[in-house]
């Protein structure tokens, strides 16, 4: 894909279109005729509210507020107000207030000012630690039916009274820290649906959280609508928990499969953290599920998920957009998260206050992450568009949450769904990265397989097996194995002259044609070519010596057929020499780290090479040590003639040799076979020092078999001994002339 063809509008316009569609859908849910009740001076008139609707009404507006006091419902029934008891309370956004009869209240806007630390006395904020009482009277219309109120979490211990009776409690609120038992709980309480004025009194105490009071709306409506709202919210928390936990575990398994990419690891951990946090937030299901756990433990876990959640997510973002994010910024934020997490070992009054600073830092860092994602989007980074779409989806659901809580649209609380969808987009992104990595791995695997298949043409599979290696990538410098094998050396006689006649291109064509013919023969008998040596080769046979000899004979027959084909094209025939030897050898790799090769090293290998070189002196065919015959299952099944002791080049110890002529063309085979007896008789006379008789016999053979090089080799050797006067000093070992 050519990135230069893609423009910024081409990237932004799809996102903008998606956002516009989301807002259009939200706008379609707006009810312009919806009546939104609001409390005024501590009184909420619900006579115009339809309790038959599916959506409960928020009990927002001006509530009576009594800071620093836990007032029972009875207080409001008999007490008379005293104007001199009132304190000046300045509430931002409230209508101010005037004391009502018997209670000296101040009116605050709920839920905006429900957290009393947001209120000020003489210009100073109230302490978040202490107690307070709220009171609201509300009017039910006739025919409201069974009604209920949904109670949110109240920091951090509370009691709720309806019409003077205790209807709900979470912990034990008291005027002192020692007597207060904090706990979080949400729920639904039924209302006496008698038409007229009803009273709601809420007591709360807080000595642990950094804020005290109520920060969420209470909802009133039919029992069905309120319970549905509560169950939906609870179900949503559980769905979010289950979904995120499943996604988290799934990505941890992905990381276990492919540990090179750590983005699934960090994303999985983040999902598990958010899953745990979902049980500690919202409807606080963990408090009901684990009722025996102290409040302080939940409070610390709540903060811990916040302290480590964003740093873990930033680690995930770093692995996704590693070329765009600053490691210094990420590491600094992670260190800060760890430092703040250590504050959890201190009392709640410490970490509940210091968390504000971490929230400010986190806000700045989240903006930085958004900047990173936008920059990655502009740079056309992989995954940036998917991440940005996920962010916009989350923002759209966040806007829906705000509008719903304001009573402006008939939808439902959906911020959790937005979070899950955002994380789902990231899961899709990781899946795409995983799939891409898998495709690349598969491609590399195919490439490696093709490479291995190609390299097997250079390094035989049998070589791997002998070294106990499966692939060429497993071979290391210095790998070796010692084993008894049959070695075969072979080359073409007078090849230099032939190459000069053919030229370079024709020579390569000729060699490939020749080697292509003999390769099948070698493999058919359990051998493999270890190395090509110009016009020759080295072959190894881990199997029996018979297999190697049969191969050599088969090669001679192939050469005969090859020569017949060359004769049809008026081309000269070729001759090959073959040497065989059996013995221990070391097979392994030599060279250096950047360039190595396979080889075989042993005295038996060197001897085999010298035996093959004797063919030019003793005739085409196969030359082996005499002891090689003892290794054959049936030596009599082959045709050979004895050559005697021969001193080969580079070796002090002489070798007793044999010339095997099976497989040669019919004329040559007949020549060697018919002259065998006379040849060995002449050789016997020569070995016994009867040089005249030997010379006479070999000269007679020269007339009968003029194409036998061995006859002329021995004639030359006898003549050299006689003329040089070395007859008496000769040790019976022949040394062929170079």
Image (cartoon, rainbow, N blue to C red):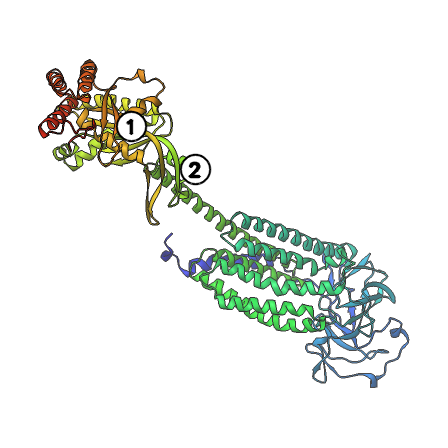
The number of numbered discs placed on residues in the rendered structure image is: 2
Residue 392 location, x and y as percent? 54, 60
465 to 545, vertically: above or below = below
Secondary structure under the numbered disc 2 in the rendered image? loop
User: Which residue of the protein is positioned furthest toward the right in this rendering?
Assistant: 78
Secondary structure under the numbered disc 1 in the rendered image? strand
Q: Which residue is mark 2?
A: 468
Q: Quadrant of the C terminus?
A: top left
Distance, label 2 to label 1, CA atoms, is 26 Å
395 to 583, vertically: above or below = below
Q: Which residue is mark 1?
A: 580
Residue 252 location, x and y as percent? 58, 51
Q: Of the residues tagged 2 and 1, which is closer to the observer? A: 1
Q: Is residue 256 visible?
A: yes
Camera-side residue of 15 and 575: 575
Camera-side residue of 637 and 319: 637
Camera-side residue of 476 and 520: 476
Q: Earlier in the sequence, mark 2 or mark 1?
A: 2
Residue 215 location, x and y as percent? 71, 68
Q: Residues within 10 Å of mark 1 (few under 14, many from 20)?
A: many
Residue 72 location, x and y as percent? 86, 71
Q: Is residue 734 left or right of residue 247?
A: left
């Amino acid at each position: 894909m050519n990135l230069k063809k893609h423009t910024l509008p081409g990237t932004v316009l799809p996102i903008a279109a998606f956002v516009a569609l989301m807002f259009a859908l939200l706008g379609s849910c707006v009810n312009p005729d919806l009546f939104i009740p609001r409390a005024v001076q501590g009184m909420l008139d619900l006579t115009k509210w339809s309790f038959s609707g599916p959506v409960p009404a928020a009990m927002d507006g001006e509530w009576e507020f009594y800071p620093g006091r836990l007032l029972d419902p009875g207080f409001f029934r008999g007490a008379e107000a005293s104007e001199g008891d009132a304190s000046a309370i300045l509430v931002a956004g409230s209508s101010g207030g005037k004391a009502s009869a018997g209670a000296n209240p101040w009116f605050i806007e709920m839920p905006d000012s429900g957290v009393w630390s947001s209120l000020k006395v003489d210009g100073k904020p109230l302490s978040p630690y202490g107690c307070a009482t709220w009171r609201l009277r509300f009017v039910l219309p006739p025919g409201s039916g069974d009604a209920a109120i949904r109670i949110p979490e109240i920091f951090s211990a509370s009691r709720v009274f309806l019409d003077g009776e205790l209807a709900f409690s979470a912990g034990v609120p008291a005027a002192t820290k020692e007597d207060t038992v904090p706990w979080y709980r949400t729920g639904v309480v039924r209302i006496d649906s008698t038409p007229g004025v009803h009273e709601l009194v809420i007591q709360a105490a807080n000595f642990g959280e950094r804020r005290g009071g109520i920060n969420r709306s209470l909802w009133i409506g039919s029992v069905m609508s309120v319970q549905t709202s509560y169950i939906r919210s609870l179900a949503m928390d559980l769905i979010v928990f289950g979904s995120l936990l499943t996604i988290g575990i799934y990505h941890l398994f992905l990381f276990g499969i492919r540990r090179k990419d750590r983005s699934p690891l960090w994303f999985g951990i983040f999902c598990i953290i958010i899953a745990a946090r979902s049980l500690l937030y919202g409807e606080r299901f963990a408090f009901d599920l684990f009722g025996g756990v102290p409040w302080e433990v939940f409070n610390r876990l709540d903060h811990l998920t916040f302290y480590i959640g964003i740093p873990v997510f930033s680690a995930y973002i770093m692995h996704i957009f590693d070329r765009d994010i600053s490691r210094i910024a990420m590491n600094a934020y992670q260190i800060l998260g760890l430092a703040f997490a250590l504050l959890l070992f201190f009392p709640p009054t410490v970490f509940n206050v210091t968390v504000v600073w971490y929230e400010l830092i986190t806000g700045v860092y989240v903006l930085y992450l958004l900047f990173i994602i936008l920059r990655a989007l502009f740079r056309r980074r992989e995954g940036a568009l998917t991440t940005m779409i996920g962010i916009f989806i989350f923002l759209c659901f966040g806007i829906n949450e705000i509008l719903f809580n304001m009573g402006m649209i008939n939808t439902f609380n959906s911020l959790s769904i937005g979070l899950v969808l955002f994380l789902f987009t990231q899961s899709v992104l990781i899946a795409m990265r995983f799939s891409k990595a898998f495709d690349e791995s598969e491609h590399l695997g195919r490439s490696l397989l093709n490479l291995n298949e190609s390299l097997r043409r250079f390094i035989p599979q049998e070589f791997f097996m002998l070294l106990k290696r499966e692939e060429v990538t497993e071979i290391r410098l210095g790998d070796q194995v010692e084993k008894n094998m049959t070695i075969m050396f072979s080359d073409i006689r007078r090849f230099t002259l032939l190459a000069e006649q053919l030229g370079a291109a024709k020579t390569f064509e000729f060699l490939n044609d020749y080697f292509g013919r003999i390769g099948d023969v070698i493999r058919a008998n359990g051998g493999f070519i270890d190395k090509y040596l110009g016009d020759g080769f080295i072959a190894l046979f881990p199997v029996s010596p018979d297999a190697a000899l049969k191969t050599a004979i088969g090669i001679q027959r192939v050469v005969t057929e090859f020569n017949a084909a060359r004769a049809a094209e008026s081309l000269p025939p070729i001759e090959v020499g073959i040497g065989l030897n059996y013995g221990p050898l070391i097979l392994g790799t030599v060279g250096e780290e950047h360039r190595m090769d396979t080889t075989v090293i042993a005295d038996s290998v060197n001897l085999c090479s010298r035996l093959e070189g004797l063919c030019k002196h003793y005739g085409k065919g196969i030359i082996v040590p005499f002891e090689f015959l003892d290794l054959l299952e049936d030596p009599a099944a082959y045709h050979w003639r004895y050559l005697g002791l021969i001193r080969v080049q580079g070796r002090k110890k002489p070798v007793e040799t044999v010339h095997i002529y099976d497989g040669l063309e019919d004329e040559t085979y007949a020549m060697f076979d018919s002259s065998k007896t006379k040849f060995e008789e002449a050789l016997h006379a020569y070995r016994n020092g009867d040089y005249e008789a030997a010379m006479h016999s070999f000269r007679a053979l020269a007339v009968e078999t003029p194409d036998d090089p061995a006859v002329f080799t021995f004639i030359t050797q006898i003549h050299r001994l006689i003329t040089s006067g070395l007859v008496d000093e000769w040790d019976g070992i022949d040394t062929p002339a170079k």
